[in-house]
Amino acid sequence: MSIGSGIALVVIGAILTFAINIEISWIDLDIVGSILMGAGLVIFILGIVGMTRKRQVVETVRVAADPATGQQVTERKTSAPR
């Protein structure tokens, strides 16, 4: 999701900087577009880094004895944090 948001911000910033030639007295659209492109690039890079980092795997082992037969029962659960 952050990769798509970053790309969207870069596109919107590029449109404001390069495609729109409107003069507004109280805001400079070139600066706003440059800020949006910079923020989009940062969000895009953070999304790539977050996607490629290694995920930890948590494994839980529970050993118990079956009361009826006395046999040992082992239960394993493996999950990766989100």
Image (cartoon, helix red, strand yellow):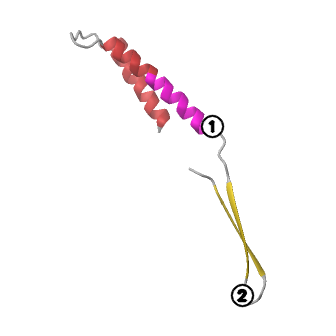
Question: Horizontal and vertical percent for residue 22?
Answer: 24, 11
Asked which quadrant contains residue 59, the reply is: bottom right
State yes or no: residue 46 in magenta: yes
The residue tagged with tag 1: helix, strand or loop? Answer: helix
- Taking depth in this image into account, of 80 and 61 the one nearest to the observer is 61
The residue tagged with tag 2: helix, strand or loop? Answer: loop
Mark 2, residue position: 67
* Relative horizontal placement of residue 41, taking residue 54 as reference (left or right): left
First to last magenta residue range? 39-52
Question: Horizontal and vertical percent for residue 28?
Answer: 29, 11
Asked which quadrant contains residue 15, the reply is: top left
Q: Main secondary structure of the magenta part?
A: helix
Mark 1, residue position: 52
Asked which quadrant contains residue 34, the reply is: top left
Query: What amino acid does circle 2 point to?
Result: Pro
Question: Horizontal and vertical percent for residue 70?
Answer: 77, 87
* Relative horizontal placement of residue 1, taking residue 60 as reference (left or right): left
Residue 14 visible (yes or no): no
The disc, 1 or 2, on the residue closer to the chain's N-terminal end is: 1
- Category of crowding for the residue at label 1, using alpha-carbon neighbours closer than 10 angstroms: few (below 14), some (14–19), many (at least 20): few
Q: Nearer the viewer, mark 1 or mark 2?
A: 2
